């Protein structure tokens, strides 16, 4: 991922810290959307400098806000640590589990992403984003396609009008392909119809085509994804897709 995230955008978020009037506003994207790479290098440096001047976080909300800020500038290890600390201080902090699952998807830590998504669902059984995260983790990482489809169906049922709905159909496309369903590509096509700029839709369709033994089509889609990731300077996703292309070309 899977930012999202692949998930819905959270733009213009303002973070405040307890015991202070300090407030910072940054364009935050859920982690699976490769948010750090939407920042020019100088701007990222400026944000890192700002982070160093902020007061020491003390509350669960402080740590969550700091984790969101860290993930927005590409400090994924720090973000995971902050979300974990938020959860230690508030064990039912749904958003902290959800955002941590986003980071894990982006870093391809699928077991952890599935575990965090499952906890979100336990706390909030109507959270469409969590069902999608778990669907994607199960499909791409763990190969549990049947359960993944069930989760994606639930995500679509709960959030078909969600800004992240393109991700829901793209995730289901991958899961259905895993079961050999050639009509799975209909979901990928619908995902890109919802959001033609959804880069992960090309990556997922490339993966689905690869599973369905359409090597030529898979490489074509993955090359589109690689080009678009390169354009937005998302080096993590670019390198991930390039690795897939090299494997298929062998």
Image (cartoon, rainbow, N blue to C red):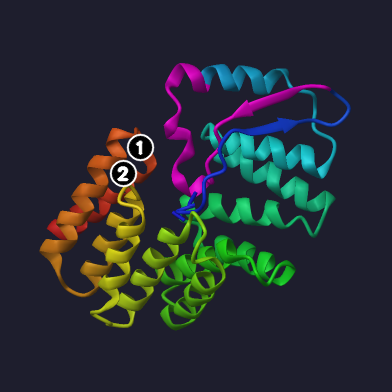
> Dot 2 corresponds to which residue?
239
Helix, strand or loop at mark 1? helix
Farthest left residue?
216
* Residue 165: assigned label: none
Mark 2 Cα-neighbour bin, 10 Å: few <14, some 14–19, many ≥20 = some
Pinpoint residue 194: horizontal percent, then vertical percent.
36, 58
Quadrant housing residue 239: top left
Q: Quadrant of the N terminus?
A: bottom left
Q: Residues within 10 Å of mark 1 (few under 14, many from 20)?
A: some
Q: Is residue 58 magenta?
A: no
Give the magenta-colored segment's residue range. 21-44
Horizontal and vertical percent position of residue 99: 61, 51
Residue 48, position in %: x, y? 59, 22
Residue at point 51%, 23% (across, down): 44
Work out which residue is located at the far right of the displayed protein and give it: 19
Task: Determine the residue located farthest toward the front in the rendered image.
Answer: 161
Residue under the point 41% across and 75% down: 143
Residue 85 showing in the rendered view: yes
Q: Can you tell which quarter of the image residue 131 is in?
A: bottom right
Q: How many marks are shown on the rendered structure?
A: 2
Does 229 sit left or right of 53 as displayed? left
- Residue nearest the observer in this picture, 148 or 22: 22
What separation in Å lies between label 1 and label 2 (alpha carbons)?
6 Å
Residue at left offset 47%, top offset 50%: 106
* Residue at the spot of label 1: 235
**Quarter holding the C terminus?**
bottom left
249 relative to 139 in the view: left or right = left
Placement of 140 over or under 60, stated as above or below: below
């Amino acid at each position: 991922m899977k930012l999202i995230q692949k998930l819905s955008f959270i733009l213009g978020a303002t973070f405040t810290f307890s015991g202070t009037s300090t407030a910072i506003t940054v364009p935050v994207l859920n982690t699976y959307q490769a948010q750090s790479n939407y920042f020019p290098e100088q701007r990222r440096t400026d944000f890192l400098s700002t982070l160093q001047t902020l007061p020491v976080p003390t509350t669960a909300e402080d740590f969550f806000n700091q984790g969101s800020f860290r993930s927005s500038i590409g400090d994924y290890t720090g973000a995971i640590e902050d979300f974990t600390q938020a959860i230690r201080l508030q064990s039912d902090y749904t958003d902290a589990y959800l955002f941590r699952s986003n980071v894990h998807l982006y870093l391809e830590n699928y077991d952890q992403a599935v575990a965090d998504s499952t906890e979100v669902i336990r706390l909030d059984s109507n959270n469409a984003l969590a069902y999608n995260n778990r669907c994607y983790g199960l499909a791409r990482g763990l190969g549990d396609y049947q359960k993944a489809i069930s989760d994606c169906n639930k995500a679509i049922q709960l959030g078909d009008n969600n800004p992240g709905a393109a991700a829901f159909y793209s995730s289901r496309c991958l899961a259905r392909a895993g079961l050999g369903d050639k009509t799975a590509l209909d979901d990928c096509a619908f995902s890109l119809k919802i959001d033609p700029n959804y880069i992960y839709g090309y990556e997922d369709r490339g993966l689905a085509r690869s599973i369905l033994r359409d090597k030529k089509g898979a490489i074509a889609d993955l090359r589109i994804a690689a080009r678009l990731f390169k354009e937005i300077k998302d080096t993590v996703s670019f390198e991930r897709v390039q690795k897939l292309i090299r494997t298929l070309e062998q």
